[in-house]
Image (tube, grey):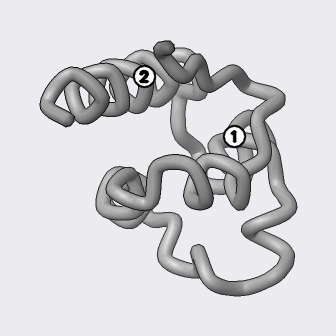
């Protein structure tokens, strides 16, 4: 079953189900993945704070997760 991440998905939930995505967050400047506030943010909130296009990031994130799930 494919995991679908949306703008409303909490970053902590993403990292719990797909920890391999951490480098994607780090690559766009989200370096505080371990702090409680970032883990509680939605993808949309985090993208807004970091000046990232949420739709483009979601596309990249979902492709990465789909490829990871296919590889396993």
| Circle on res. 62 | 2
Residue 64's quadrant in the figure?
Answer: top left
Q: Which residue reaches farthest left?
A: 71
Residue 21 horizontal side relative to residue 39, left or right:
left
Q: Is residue 8 left or right of residue 58?
A: right
Q: Residue 63 falls in which quadrant of the image?
A: top left
Q: Residue at x 47, y 15 (%)?
A: 2
Q: Position of residue 37 (x, y in %)?
A: 85, 75
Q: Give the residue number, with chain letter if any, for mark 1.
A: 43
Which of pointers 2 and 1 lies earlier in the amino acid sequence?
A: 1
- Horizontal and vertical percent position of residue 69: 30, 29
Residue in the picture at 36% in, 31% down? 65
Q: Residue at x 51, y 24 (%)?
A: 58
- In this view of the protein, which residue sits in the foreground, 9 or 56? 9
Assign the C terminus to one quadrant of the image: top left
Dot 1: few (<14), some (14–19), or many (≥20) neighbours within 10 Å? many
Res 26 quadrant in image = bottom left
Q: Position of residue 8 (x, y in %)?
A: 82, 29
Q: CA distance from mark 2 to mark 1?
A: 12 Å
């Amino acid at each position: 079953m494919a995991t679908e991440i949306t703008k409303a998905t909490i970053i902590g939930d993403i990292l719990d189900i797909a920890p391999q995505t951490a480098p994607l967050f780090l690559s766009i400047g989200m370096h505080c993945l371990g702090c409680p506030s970032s883990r509680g943010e939605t993808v949309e909130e985090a993208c807004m704070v970091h000046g990232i296009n949420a739709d483009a990031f979601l596309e990249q994130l979902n492709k990465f997760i789909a490829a990871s799930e296919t590889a396993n």
